[in-house]
Image (cartoon, rainbow, N blue to C red):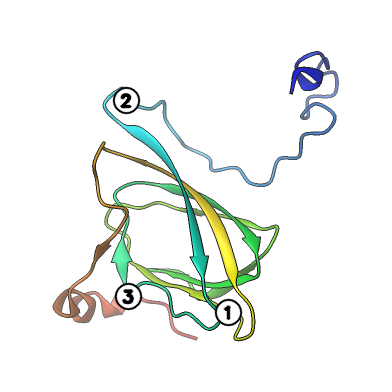
Amino acid sequence: MSELLHHPQTTGGPPAGVEILAEAPGVAPMSEDLVVRTILVTLAPGSPGAPPHRHPGPIYGYVVKGAVAFELEGQPERVIRAGEAFHEPGGDVIHYKGANALEDEESALIATMVCEPGAPVLTVVAHEELEARKHLRVTA
């Protein structure tokens, strides 16, 4: 780490040895009453992941192993593979799917979440609300 601190930034990009994996525009300074939480999610082969849910705040994630089938309200389902990053706004947006896209091997991701202290990592969305908001889901 100290090696990176001594590299002057001369080209406007990151210093040597640093690779920017993803950026999320419009992120404001964080209030002192919030925390940043980093979690490791490990999905067994073929795991469907959690049922449709919400997160208490924005998430910035990176798939470290395998592949994850990922679907957020208002977006089509996609597969995020090891080495790829993602952003999720949290709050009111429903996270429909975060499943292991692989049937024969484990997948894992690291997610960093901004939220209030003690907030649950996720809250499952009731069936009635899913029905009421189904018009917001993108289907292929």
In this view, the residue in front, 61 or 104, is: 104
Q: Alpha-carbon distance for marks 3 and 1?
A: 15 Å
Question: Mark 3 sits on what residue?
Answer: 51
Few, some or many C-alpha atoms within 10 Å of disc 1 (few <14, some 14-19, many ≥20)? Answer: many
SS class, disc 1 = loop
Name which residue type carries label 1: Ala
Q: Is residue 8 left or right of 36 when viewed as pictured?
A: right
Please give the name of the residue rendered at 65% of the width and 70% of the height, measured from the top-left corner: 66
Residue 35 location (% of width, % of height): 35, 33
Tell which circle, 3 or 1, labels the residue nearer the N-terminal end: 3
Residue 1 location (% of width, % of height): 74, 24
Q: Alpha-carbon distance for marks 1 and 2?
A: 36 Å
Tell which circle, 1 or 2, labels the residue nearer the N-terminal end: 2
Please give the name of the residue rendered at 60% of the width and 42% of the height, measured from the top-left corner: 23
Tell which circle, 2 or 3, labels the residue nearer the N-terminal end: 2
Name which residue type carries label 2: Ser
Residue 132 against residue 94 in the figure, above or below: below
Q: Alpha-carbon distance for marks 2 and 3?
A: 30 Å
* View extreme (left): residue: 128
Q: Residue 31 bears which disc, if any?
A: 2
- Frontmost of labels 1 and 2 is 1
Residue 100 figure quarter? bottom right
Name which residue type carries label 3: Pro
